[in-house]
Image (spheres, grey):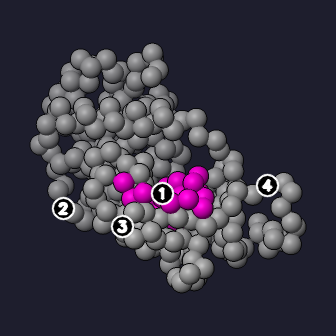
Amino acid sequence: MSTEPQRILVIDDEPQIRRFLRISLVSQGFVVYEAASGREGLELAVKEAPDLVLLDLGLPDMDGQAVLDRLRARSQVPVIVVSVRGQETEKVRALDHGANDYMTKPFGIQELLARIRALLRFREATQDTPEGQRYWGNGLLIDSSERRVWRDGMPVHLTPKEYAVLERLCRHSGRVVTQTQLLREVWGPSHAEDTHYLRIVISKLRHKIDDDPGAQSLLQTEAGIGYRLMIEPESADDPADKKENLP
């Protein structure tokens, strides 16, 4: 664990909420930055490079979902949405757009602190993951350095959650990754039982990257356990004919 104080950016237009969060977080040893608007929050995210963001959706200048999209375009900083919007559609939309967790106001501060600690522990544990690897198999190419995917030479558009699931399956290519592991790593520790989120993403991924749902499927299901991606890390001595149609 780093000895440096961890930094949290709070983006919320309610002064009382910001004050409550600042007092609670500072008492736990965190450094806190505050923004009352989406634009100010995005500027602070660039300037201060926080370790985690607490994001409200009802901001005065732009919707929090748009702030989340812009954060995800430049960073994988953990984001917990903290909002009065409790509808399932709002939660699913935020999670699909890259939020790591979602809490509905009013919330218990101890539960929020526990979720913050869990996400920060996971972030530290995964910071040493090597980047720049390319994976390919049966016409599919994933470039982790560019966070881009191609199928038969054509670019494939993936949502942040779809890419995050695919990238983690790539790390363990050819091996089964459990549902619990994927949920913990992509959605966060508090979502380890939310298998319906994962099933939806896997279904969309399979439609986008896999044209053979049978025995030769690239994305295979191990019933009741998890998923396996049949793909290989690209190496310098791979035969040229296998890569001739790849970008």
Camera-near label (3 vs 4) is 3
Distance of label 3 from label 1 (alpha carbons) = 11 Å
In the rendered image, residue 168 lying in the magenta stretch gets the answer yes
**Residue located 54% across and 84% down the image:** 214
Q: Main secondary structure of the magenta part?
A: helix
Disc 1 secondary structure class: strand
Q: Which quadrant holds residue 26? A: top left
Instruction: Report the magenta residues as a range.
Output: 158-180
Q: In the rendered image, is residue 41 in sight? A: no
For mark 2, what is the residue? 87
- Which mark sits nearer the N-terminus, 3 or 1? 1
What secondary structure is found at the residue carrying circle 2? loop
Q: Amino acid at mark 4?
A: Ser
Q: Of the residues under marks 2 and 1, which one precedes in the sequence?
A: 2
Residues at marks 2 and 1 touching, judged by CB atoms closer than 8 Å: no
Q: Quadrant of the N terminus?
A: top left
Residue type pointed to by label 2 = Gln
Q: Nearer the viewer, residue 199 or 57?
A: 199
Residue 232: give x, y in percent of width and height.
68, 61
Picture quadrant where residue 116 is located: top left
Q: Residues within 10 Å of mark 3 (few under 14, many from 20)?
A: few
- Left or right, residue 196 beside residue 173: left
Q: Which residue is mark 3?
A: 224
Residue under label 1, please give it: 177
